[in-house]
Image (tube, rainbow, N blue to C red):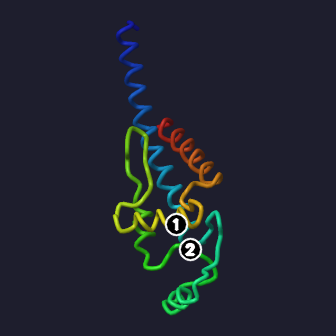
Amino acid sequence: MKMQDWIKKLEGDLSRINEVNDKAVRIAALDTNAKVVKRVFNDGNIPTKRQYTSESYKKKRAKRGFQTAFVNLTFEGTLQKDFANSITKIGQAKYAAGVKNRANVGKVDGANDRYNNPFSLTSEEKANFVDIHKKEMIAWLSR
């Protein structure tokens, strides 16, 4: 094989690896974000697990049929829906989670201040991301 042919082959291989890596990162990001949404919004498992202290707010939640035993950052569901659907590509194999609706930015900032960054990945979620990424890379490259 000539040097030029070898270089072309390597460039093709590298391009395929970059494409596969981007797909694997996206899948891992979506899966991990779903786990964050479940932890924060459904389970109320946030770094400083707290109980609602405002009796009027507890009554308001109870009246709507929501649990009042612990903070789970769910009331109307707009923040949860926005965060759950927020995975955005920001570069080659780079994705970010957050909120797109401006009305929810203040809610996230307030939750981060009040509850010690509940949207930050836990060590288990980081490990999940790595595991999913690895499995997806192997699956895609084995095709």
Residue 51 lies in what quarter of the image? Answer: bottom right
Residue type at numbered disc 1 = Ala
The residue at which mark 1 appears reads as: 111
The residue at which mark 2 appears reads as: 72
Q: Residue at x 60, y 46 (%)?
A: 131
Image position, residue 104 (x, y; %): 40, 67
Picture layout, residue 6 above or below residue 102: above
Q: Which badge, 2 or 1, is on the more N-terminal residue? A: 2
Residue type at numbered disc 2 = Asn
Image position, residue 58 (x, y; %): 56, 87
Picture layout, residue 34 above or below residue 141: below
In front: 106, or 46?
Answer: 106
Image position, residue 110 (x, y; %): 49, 66
Q: Which residue is drawn at 40% across and 31% down?
A: 16
Of the 4 image quadrants, the one containing the N terminus is top left
Residue 67 lies in what quarter of the image? Answer: bottom right
Q: Residue at x 43, y 47 (%)?
A: 95
Picture layout, residue 124 above or below residue 43: above
